[in-house]
Image (cartoon, rainbow, N blue to C red):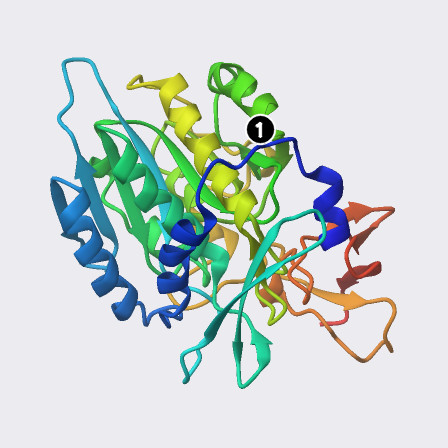
Amino acid sequence: MIEQLEKVQTTYECKYDIREEVKLLKALAAINSPSYEEDLMIDFLDKQLTKLADEVYKDEFGNLIAVKGVLLENEYYPCVVAHMDNVFNHKETPKFRIDKIKGGYTKVYSSINNKQVGTGFDDKNGIFIALKLLEKLPKLKVIFTVAEEVGAIGASKLDPDIFNDVGYCLEGDRKGNSDVITSIWDFICSTDFIVKITPVMDKYGYSENDGMLTDVAAIREFVPISCINYSVGYYNLHTDAEYTIMEDLLKALDFATECIETLGYSLYEHEISYNKHDKYTSYNDYGFDDYSYGNYLNKDLLDLNSEIDNRRLNRYSGYMCTCGEELEEKEHTFYCPFCNKHFIYDYRY
């Protein structure tokens, strides 16, 4: 992944003190917060938010909502979303490690007993950015959700009234350093919205792409506003080889800051529709419920490089390879560009 990273790295000049900025990420990485067991993260964030926001509360499902600043007439809050859960469940506290790698980038990762482990930079990087934005910006609404990794459950349970004074949503829950996700099954933001932030995307080396299930996809089901999900500098997600490039994370912070400064306190509406999959009429019709996350096509995927009876991917992986890379449709198969493997649907079951 480092080779791929260097190819898409922009000329972004990091002006932050890495030694200072990494302290918050280290604190987040030390918190064990698997899905449905986010209490430690909730407690940590509650203390942070009390210092940063004017209003902080938790809904009945465990989602945390923070509001900073008072709106003027005809203003709307920018909203930042991140999820508190991750796919790991460590019994020991991981040791945080920092290396300088080729190109001068700062690689951060974790280990237990000198063995590298994942700690959930998906989406602790998003949490990092949300907290930093609360420090920097005068008016902001932030939502930290539970149970995203098992089907964006927390986001799907949010009270729609939370968004009555929200103009748009930005979520930092994407691998790499160059994607702005504008389509998840269908477009999740308006053309006007994208046109407005295109100069900022160009400045920081971001471009539009399609994405997978995440919280803004669930929010867009019942809230008619523009949303995006963008890259926040983590790699090899959902694996023990997971790491973050600190410069990419800080670039994402600057990108989000300038997007909000550009968009301001305006409303960017976007109608609710799922043109690509008209037969689905509600969130649960995609195959998600309160306890499981299933591929909405409900078919297992077979690794064509393995023996036919070895089902490497099951429906709980969705369109994600076991290495954490998203699969691409290619010549009637699904292709992993990282593992160089092809997968097909398993119609035997």
- The N terminus appears in which quarter of the rendering? bottom right
In this rendered view, identify the residue nearer to me: 201 or 146. Answer: 201
Classify residue 303 as left or right of residue 179: right
In this rendered view, identify the residue nearer to me: 176 or 109. Answer: 109
Q: Secondary structure at mark 1?
A: helix
Going by the numbered disc 1, the residue's amino acid type is Tyr
Taking the spot 29% from the left edge, 45% from the top edge, the residue there is 143
Residue at numbered disc 1:
204
Classify residue 73 as left or right of residue 45: left
In this rendered view, identify the residue nearer to me: 157 or 100. Answer: 100
Q: Give the quadrant of residue 13.
A: top right
Please tell me whether residue 215 is drawn above or below residue 77 in the rendered image. below
Q: Give the quadrant of residue 71.
A: top left
Coordinates of residue 205 in the picture (x, y in percent) = 63, 29
Q: Give the quadrant of residue 336.
A: bottom right
Marker count (numbered): 1
